[in-house]
Image: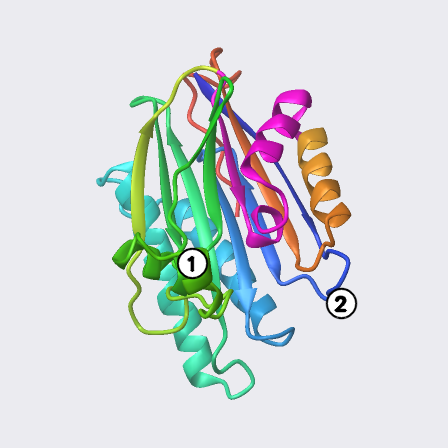
Amino acid sequence: MRAVAAGLSDVGRQRHHNEDRFILLPEFNVFVVADGMGGHQSGEVASRMAASSIAKYFRNEGKPDITVGQRLRAAVLEANAKIYARADDSRLHRGMGTTVVAGAYAPDDRTFFVAHAGDSRCYRLRGDEIKQLTRDHSLISDALLERPDLTELDLKYLPKNVITRALGISPTVDVDLRAERVEPHDVFVLCSDGLHGLVTDEEIAGIVRDNVILTEACARLIEAANANGGRDNITVVLVRIEPDDPPWAGRRPSYYR
């Protein structure tokens, strides 16, 4: 089985700059979405560094003796170290950070790995079911983890959009890693909160099901978020597992830099 992917990013309706970044590395089956924080001068830099650092790690064949999942997590940790060093060294970029959600498909194991920090999400669509694979690292999500009995009224007193984990905020970061066995036609949705904050899970699933061409599905998802206000940058990457082998199966991929 092989993974095919498409991605799209949009500034939204209320922001002047796009601080989101995504990257597709089909030759390594690696896909990344990053949502920068800290304003135009900083958030944009942090998300760009996250995407480029992860890409560079895989292009340089970093630690090929470890598993795909371990490599993905190591790449995210390396990105954190680079962003933190830049922020610590530059007054202009001090305090910058970025959420990240990254996926890597291991065809030999038929497993999709997800690494994340922050509130950018990964969903899996299988048939008519959509499942959130990541847990938001946010104040509200952490509160619900500690106190599942909190009511809607209780949650109203908690500030929204407060992130408890992100890349670049401290020298180290706790990166969640999850492994999912894949089935043919599974679709993985990697997205920033500009999408999942305005479009329900059920609407996301319906749009992806109704648009077989991945680029069109990405465009329809962004249109839906903008139609609901578009109050943040919107980024989505769709990865579909197809039952046939890639045309280069059995050959070593040609690496580029």
| Label 1 with label 2: CB-CB less than 8 Å | no
Magenta residues span 185-214
In the rendered image, which quarter is residue 11 located in?
bottom right
Do we see residue 212 in this rendering?
no
Classed neighbour count for the residue bearing mark 1: other residues with Cα under 10 Å, few (<14), some (14–19), many (≥20): many
In the displayed structure, 214 sits above or below 114; it is: above
As for residue 192 lying within the magenta part, the answer is yes
Residue 57 falls left or right of residue 255: left
Q: Point out the tag, 1 or 2, that comes first from the N-terminus.
A: 2
Residue closest to the eye, 155 or 135: 155
Q: Residue at x 53, y 16 (%)?
A: 247
Q: Residue at x 51, y 65 (%)?
A: 161
Q: Residue at x 60, y 67 (%)?
A: 44
In the displayed structure, 42 sits above or below 242; it is: below
Q: Which residue is mark 2?
A: 16
Element type where label 1 sits in the image: loop
Residue 119, horizontal then vertical, whole percent: 46, 55
Residue 75 falls left or right of residue 8: left
In the displayed structure, 153 sits above or below 247; it is: below
Residue 35, horizontal then vertical, whole percent: 54, 59
Residue lying furthest bottom: 91
As for residue 241 lying within the magenta part, the answer is no
Quarter of the image for the N terminus: give it. Answer: top left
Q: How many marks?
A: 2
Under mark 2, the amino acid is: His
Q: Which residue is mark 1?
A: 118
Residue lying furthest top: 244
Under mark 1, the amino acid is: Gly
